[in-house]
Image (cartoon, grey):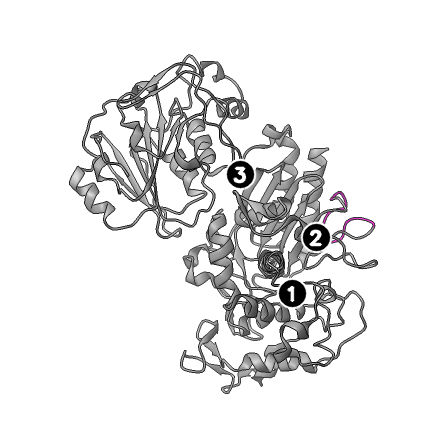
Amino acid sequence: MIRSAALIFSGLFFAFCMNPSKRNLTPIFPDAPTTWYSSELDSLNGKASYEQSLAYEKSIVVIANKNNLLPLGNLDFKSAHISIGGNPTVFHNGLDRYVSNDQLLRPSLHDHELKEFIKQAQHDVVFLSIHATKETKLDSLDATIFNALPHHSKVILCVFGDQSIIAQLPTKAFDAIIWAKENHEIAQERVSQLIFGSIGATAKLGKELHSLDQVFPAGQAIQTSSNGRLKFSSPEEIGVDSKKLYGIDLIAQEGIEKGAYPGCQILVAVNDQIIWRKCYGKQSYDAKASNVQNQDVYDIASVTKIAASTLLAMHLQSKGQYSLDKKLKEFIPEVTGDGPFGNILIRDMMAHQAGLTPWIPFYKRTIQNGIWNTNVYSQTQKPGFERQVATGLYINDAYTDSMYAQILRSTLGPKKYEYSDLCYYFTQKILEKQIGQKQHTYLEKQIYRPMGLRYMRYLPLEHFDKSHIIPTENDQAFRKQLLHGFVHDPGAAMLGGVAGHAGIFANATDLASIMQLFLNKGKYAGMEFFSESVCNEYTKQQFPGNRRGAGFDRPNASGGGTCDELASSQSFGHSGFTGTLAWADPKNKVIFIFLSNRVNPSQDNWKIRDMNIRTRIQHVIYQSLQ
């Protein structure tokens, strides 16, 4: 792709996308400027940060965009970031919110070294950023590095500085060019959002712009639009005083101080913008426990029902491969037979009124006098015992059949609302039969990775460093150990960690993106994962006297319930046994995510419920909007 001239410079930063758990960014330059220097942007100095951000967005110019590369939609690709000149930290961190990077920072790197380094990884997209080092200028800009860049890559150039920098570049060589004008930290942050479609570009060139090989005429404008990704913003940008949200801090900290949970993540999005994203407390009550960080993942328990299974059901129904109006025997007769379970209507089941038993403690039959049954479990992985339940514990592969046999021997009650995990044992069988693979594999490849969700996965130990996985219960009843990286729900664990009702680990940011997908009626980042009609069908109340949607929880008829009383009657979401909640309100365009491990160290701790932590925080959010 890049076939001409190159650059020699005083500092070069190179990063390539591999493993999101490895993060080592150490700046070698002075901090990015916080002062605007150009006459065009000087008037922003002295204004509030949010005013600067909103005003600056209108000045970003996209001067090239071959084949409408920008904004980037499907993020299932490998990327690299090469940065020249001043400090790129804010820009790189902005990119890192969307695509994963390892970091390598060097004071200098010769042409042959860069060539060898690039050979180590294949990049689909290269982000090349050039940063002014003195006010809006660059110290030096010569030739010798461009021809080291991979020819097969799409290369996006971002110039954070004066147009004199662009004048020295072979601009025809790039697939997209963004002129950011200054190396201000706000400029770096907002340009990173523009690349991925969280914001759009509307500015025109005020005067003619020259490069080595072409001229960009005055008045030229290549406009891009937001593609539905959540924008990283602030309360003031949507007209809300941040002080009105300080009650969130107080309630979250109260929960920690009173032992409701050791720590939590809280995210609030309004009008498609994340206005609050904070971490509180520690990963556990251990004295050596780390502070909770944004990239830490929580066991979201039953929120899995909407973030994985219901999402997949909606996706398949939009393709004609699933239906709420069919019976179980029409999809999985080999499981249910033609008896009472086979005649369960899927709509009844997903609204929790099919008469299924609420819960079966499958593990109890596999323990005798507190000892694991050796016919069911092995403490080493071996043929016939491939699925891991916990550290040093594997279950007989055939025991899944015994679990379904127990369900089919249970008694079906009357058709009235009674919450049950068991319906998602059946949806998993249906969905995996329809897709011909395990649902975690399909979800990751077809939905999570294209959306750019790097912190939402089943089987977290296969994807994340253990230090970023939040521990849950010290389970002495079943697995005889602290659960750290293994699903808390015992039934999901006995299925190997991938279940319809539990098993997903996620951070608040990625879970918010799933809720935004629901608010967007199936569209996200220029992609469609399910239809608007299917979304409307699943999120509405299914039956009179039963507040539930299909898979989704909803408010009580009089308001409140799982959510706060101020949430609209159109809102929907789900809570999780481990101390989690994800809620979306299409009327008020509000998303609320609360993730905690209230079950650490014991699931008998119900202070989070008794103190109404989640709904009280949600109440603060709605009051601030009023």
Q: Earlier in the sequence, mark 1 or mark 3?
A: 3
Task: Give me the residue at 41% from left, 57% from top.
Answer: 465
Q: Position of residue 506 (x, y in %)?
A: 52, 54
Give the amino acid type for the residue marked by disc 1 in the picture. Asp
Please state, as top left, top right, bottom left or bottom right, where the N terminus lies in the image: top left
Residue 60's quadrant in the figure? top left
Q: Earlier in the sequence, mark 2 or mark 1?
A: 2
Q: Residue 604 bears which disc, if any?
A: 1
Pointer 2 and pointer 1: residues touching (CB < 8 Å)?
Answer: no
The image shows residue 596, relative to residue 491, as above or below, that is above
Q: Position of residue 338 (x, y in %)?
A: 70, 81
Q: Position of residue 496 (x, y in %)?
A: 51, 71
Q: Residues within 10 Å of mark 3 (few under 14, many from 20)?
A: many
Front-most of residues 245 and 10: 10
Spatial CA span between label 2 and label 1: 31 Å
Q: Earlier in the sequence, mark 3 or mark 2?
A: 3
Q: Secondary structure at mark 1?
A: loop
Q: Residue 621 bears which disc, if any?
A: none
**What is the magenta segment's predominant secondary structure?**
loop
Residue denoted by label 2? 539
Q: For the residues carrying marks 2 and 1, which lies nearer the camera in this image?
A: 2
Front-most of residues 268 and 307: 307
Give the amino acid type for the residue marked by disc 2 in the picture. Thr
Which contiguous range is marked in magenta?
558-567
Task: Give me the residue at 42% from left, 62% from top.
Answer: 462
Front-most of residues 171 and 420: 171
Residue denoted by label 3? 227
Q: Secondary structure at mark 3?
A: loop
The image shows residue 67, relative to residue 372, as above or below, that is above
Residue 383's quadrant in the figure? bottom left
Q: Is residue 184 left or right of residue 199?
A: left
